[in-house]
Image (cartoon, rainbow, N blue to C red):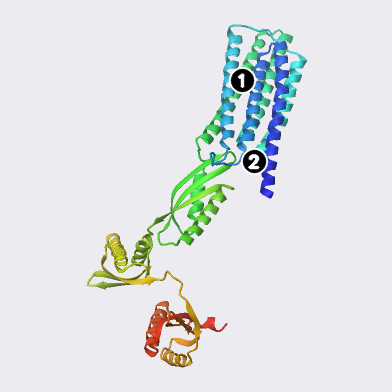
């Protein structure tokens, strides 16, 4: 609700200030035309032409502001913000046309056709009023443009701020013409067309600045230094190996960033998603409120071990390997591994998949000489259990087995179940805190084997190891 209200408020403010600019442009243009014709001042007429084109530009700005604030749709997936840049580009063309006309008239009056100028109090009053109005609307436009980062309103604000200086130059030209008559200096009559040329120079300067901004926006030029800041922010994210691509574009007041980052090929999908979120947050630190798309690509890490490479090849084939063992036999590496496959596969289908996996591993990891894979069935169905069963005699026999393992502190929470007519056992086993994980696995494996020897009816045994400190809580 708050976002929709703020967006509506933004649209109202932008349209209101653009509409006020049109009203002001109409009034100023009419006054300059009337006074320019009555005085014959090219400086004032050039200002009138300038203001007339400003009126057209203000109308274009108003229209572009209305269109650019429309939300994205199926045909305009980046929104309509580029319309502001397009309108600013049109304003640049109009300003250049103004310059051509002013320069043509000024040269004609300077060298070929002299025109008598009649400076009057009305001329000075109109130009003074123009300066006051331009100051008022340029400040309002700039405030709203800065608030909402509107390129079209920025263009209008820039126009009207330079209009202040060009109007001041025209006033100076009229004053010099008046001084020439007062002190019988006819050469000062040339001050008016010279002032017009100065106005043209100002307009060219404004047009060039605006043209660079609009062309950069239309060609999706990245803001200076932003790309490097984004790369620095992305490299700060733990898990990013390399930044492959950074693309930035701007539509209206919003930036869009498309970034590709390389991550280790062994990271999980969930981890990749977490890193991508952190990358997007880092990009928004450099470009607030940017629309960010992060593309993650897999890459072999520099410090990738042989075991990492084996898992990476398996993951690429959507297979899960575990219990990997690598032996150096006479300088040649032999790999043994367990692979889980869907229990609904036939033996031939499972063997074909494993053969393909082993071939890829040998091809990618040249140091491997041979591979032996133990194929395990991965459950694909939910088993139905008859529930816990009581087996007090079994529990006592198993307790006596654990007494032969010094690493085991105690055994508890034993649960016997019958699933499909088979006896299952699950239990918790407390071990010493500092026991290495490899030793924990060895103890678990040994216990499972001894339990089955002691109770041959057991089909499956699952042991959950716990640290001793955790068991004291």
- For the residue carrying disc 1, how many other residues have a C-alpha within 10 Å: few (<14), some (14-19), or many (20+)? many
Q: Earlier in the sequence, mark 1 or mark 2?
A: 2
What element does badge 2 sit on? helix
Q: In the drawing, does residue 461 fall left or right of residue 131?
A: left
Asked if residue 139 can be seen in this view, the reply is: no
Q: At x 59% / y 48%, what residue is drawn?
A: 289
- Residue 10 placed where, x, y %? 68, 41
Residue 148's disc number: 2
Q: At x 77% / y 15%, what residue is drawn?
A: 121
Query: Where's the C terminus, which quadrant?
Result: bottom right
Residue occupied by mark 1: 198
Q: Nearer the viewer, residue 250 or 142?
A: 250
- Which residue sits furthest left? 330
Q: In the drawing, does residue 282 fall left or right of residue 330?
A: right
Q: CA distance from mark 1 to mark 2?
A: 33 Å
Relative height, residue 64 to residue 278 (above, below):
above
Q: Nearer the viewer, residue 22 or 171?
A: 22
Q: Nearer the viewer, residue 166 or 368?
A: 368
Relative height, residue 463 to residue 315 (above, below):
below
What element does badge 1 sit on? helix
């Amino acid at each position: 609700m708050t976002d929709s209200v703020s967006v509506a408020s933004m649209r109202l403010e932008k349209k209101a200030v653009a509409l006020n600019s049109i009203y002001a442009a109409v009034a100023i243009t009419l006054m300059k035309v009337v006074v320019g014709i009555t005085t014959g001042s090219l400086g004032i007429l050039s200002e009138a032409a300038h203001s007339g084109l400003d009126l057209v530009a203000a109308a274009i700005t108003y229209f572009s502001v209305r269109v650019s604030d429309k939300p994205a749709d199926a045909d305009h997936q980046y929104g309509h913000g580029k319309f502001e840049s397009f309108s600013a580009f049109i304003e640049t063309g109009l300003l250049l046309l103004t310059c051509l006309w002013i320069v043509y008239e000024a040269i004609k009056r300077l060298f070929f056709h002299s025109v008598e100028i009649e400076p009057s109090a009305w001329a000075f009053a109109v130009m003074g009023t123009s300066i006051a109005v331009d100051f008022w609307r340029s400040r309002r436009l700039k405030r709203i443009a800065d608030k909402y980062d509107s390129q079209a309103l920025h263009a209008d604000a820039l126009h009207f701020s330079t209009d202040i200086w060009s109007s001041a130059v025209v006033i100076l030209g009229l004053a010099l013409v008046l001084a020439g008559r007062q002190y019988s200096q006819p050469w000062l009559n040339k001050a008016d067309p010279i002032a017009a040329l100065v106005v043209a120079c100002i307009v060219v300067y404004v047009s060039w600045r605006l043209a660079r901004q609009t062309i950069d926006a239309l060609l999706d030029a990245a803001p200076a230094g932003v790309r490097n800041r984004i790369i620095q922010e992305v490299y700060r994210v733990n898990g990013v190996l390399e930044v492959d691509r950074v693309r930035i574009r701007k539509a209206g007041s919003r930036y869009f960033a498309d970034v590709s980052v390389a991550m280790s090929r062994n990271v999980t999908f969930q981890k990749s998603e977490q890193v991508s979120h952190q990358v997007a947050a880092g990009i928004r630190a450099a470009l607030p409120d940017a629309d960010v798309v992060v593309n993650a690509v897999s890459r072999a890490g520099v410090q990738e071990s042989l075991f990492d490479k084996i898992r990476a090849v398996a993951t690429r084939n959507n297979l899960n390997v575990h219990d990997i063992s690598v032996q150096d036999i006479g300088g040649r590496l032999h790999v043994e591994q367990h692979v889980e496959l869907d229990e609904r596969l036939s033996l031939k289908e499972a063997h074909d998949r494993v053969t393909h996996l082993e071939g890829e591993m040998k091809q990618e990891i040249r140091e491997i000489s041979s591979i032996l894979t133990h194929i395990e069935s991965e459950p694909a169905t939910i088993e139905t259990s008859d529930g816990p069963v009581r087996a007090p005699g079994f529990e006592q026999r198993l307790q006596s087995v654990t007494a032969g393992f010094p690493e085991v502190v105690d055994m508890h929470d034993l649960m016997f179940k019958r699933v499909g007519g088979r006896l299952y056992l699950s239990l918790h086993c407390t071990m010493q805190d500092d026991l290495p994980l490899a030793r924990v696995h060895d103890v678990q494996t040994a216990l499972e084997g001894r339990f089955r020897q002691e109770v041959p009816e057991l089909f499956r045994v699952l042991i959950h190891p716990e640290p001793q400190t955790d068991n004291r809580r």
